[in-house]
Amino acid sequence: MINEIEIIDNRILELEQQYALTLEYIDMINGGMEDPDVTIEQCQNRLLVLSEKRQALIDYRDTIVWYNILGGKMTTLSNEEKISIINQHKKNVEYSKYNLQVSLIEENAVTSPDQDAIDSLNDKITEINKKITALDAEIASLS
């Protein structure tokens, strides 16, 4: 178990480093660096993908930990435990949403905001809001 969790944690760290580098790249583009092959929107899409991959690994790691805590037996989780897991997942979705909101602030701050990028960010925020609504509904059904 330890080795597998260490491998997952290392992969999560790698994703977080890629995320930070992508944020730095966006800052460089906003600072005037031009790269004809990469747009801010592509970078923002990469941030979303990295965030989703990170969350999937965290969820997988948590499953392994719970499995081992339960002595290798998958038992039925109580509603309280399910709500706790959903709340953890919801928090990570909220992080993704906030990152998009920060990107939206940055895009609106430039002299000539890219309307396509703004529309794309707003669409992604709308999709995340739908996920949050679905998670809230699941919590309500378990309460």
Image (cartoon, rainbow, N blue to C red):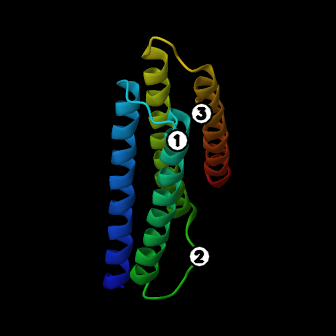
Q: CA distance from mark 1 to mark 3?
A: 25 Å
Q: Whole-percent x and y of residue 48? A: 52, 46
Residue 47 vs residue 28, the one in the foreground: 28
Residue in the image at 35% along x and 31% along y? 27
Q: Is residue 141 above or below residue 75?
A: above
Q: Is residue 133 above or below residue 7?
A: above
Q: Whole-percent x and y of residue 76? A: 59, 76
Q: Is residue 63 left or right of residue 130?
A: left
| Label 3 CA crowd tier, 10 Å (few <14, some 14–19, many 20+) | many
Residue 11, located in which quarter of the rendered image?
A: bottom left
Residue in the image at 61% along x and 40% along y? 128
Q: Secondary structure at mark 2?
A: loop
Q: Mark 2 sits on what residue?
A: 76
Which mark lies nearer to you, 1 or 2? Answer: 1
Which quadrant does the N terminus fall into? Answer: bottom left
Looking at the image, is mark 1 or mark 3 earlier in the sequence? 1
Q: Whole-percent x and y of residue 117? A: 58, 27
Q: CA distance from mark 3 to mark 2?
A: 34 Å
| Label 1 CA crowd tier, 10 Å (few <14, some 14–19, many 20+) | few
Residue in the image at 59% along x and 33% along y? 125
Q: Mark 3 sits on what residue?
A: 125
